Amino acid sequence: MGAFERAQAGSAGGASGLEIVYLEARPALLRFLRARGAGDSAEDLLQELWIKASAGAAGPIRDPLPYLYRTAANLMLDRRRSEIRQARREEDYAGPADERSDAPSPERELESRQDLEAAEDVLQALGERTVAIFRRFRLEGASQKQIADELGISLSAVEKHLQRAYRALIELRRRLDAG
């Protein structure tokens, strides 16, 4: 006996034909909803599916299984439209992306400038050669070997200049974080 025949027989008993088909197809409907992006809300959508399907049926439904799948697809479509409307409302509330600014607050910008000036002062105190090596390596991306060749010094000397710069900047960071 197929789902349609059980539905016909069930309508004579306690359960409606649609309910019998729904209960039989429930696992497949759940997979259907999850496959279309329902995720964790698939169970909730399945419950909503039953409420809408049973309330919308004014009389016997000729093909109950396709009716349930169509209702499930419509629920997913309604859900997607609702998400789009919500995203638009949020965007309208926040303003267009080109009007929003990712720029830091004036206070944060001032603080960053002061930190940068302090870092430059610390580096300058280490000497011109250390500053030049640090800038070439960190800002310009030159290799330590390339810097050593350009300045006519050993690779070990380049590493020592970089270590001095790093130690001084770490100490500065500790002071800034503490105060």
Image (cartoon, rainbow, N blue to C red):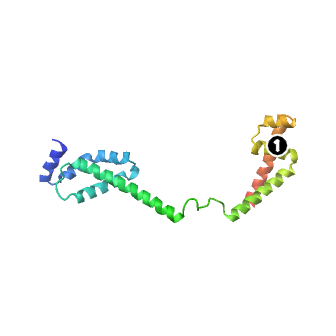
Position of residue 46 relative to residue 141, above or below, is: below
Q: Residue at x 24, y 50 (%)?
A: 67
Position of residue 45 relative to residue 164, above or below, is: below
Query: Quick one: quadrant of the N terminus?
Result: top left
Position of residue 135 relative to residue 83, above or below, is: above
**Circle 1 residues within 10 Å: few <14, some 14–19, many ≥20:** many
Relative to 119, 77 lies left or right:
left
Relative to 77, 51 lies left or right:
left
Q: What count of labels does the image hold?
A: 1
Q: Nearer the viewer, residue 66 or 22?
A: 66
Q: Position of residue 69 (x, y in %)?
A: 28, 49
Q: Residue at x 20, y 52 (%)?
A: 18
Disc 1, SS: helix
Q: Nearer the viewer, residue 129 or 140?
A: 140
Q: Which residue is mark 1?
A: 133
Q: Residue at x 47, y 60 (%)?
A: 88
Relative to 26, 150 lies left or right:
right
Relative to 97, 29 lies left or right:
left
Query: Quick one: quadrant of the C terminus?
Result: bottom right
Q: Residue at x 56, y 59 (%)?
A: 97
Residue 112, located in which quarter of the rendered image? bottom right
Q: Position of residue 147 (x, y in %)?
A: 81, 37
Residue 104, located in which quarter of the rendered image? bottom right
Which kind of residue does numbered mark 1 sit on? Ile
Q: Position of residue 133 (x, y in %)?
A: 82, 43
Q: Residue furthest left?
A: 12
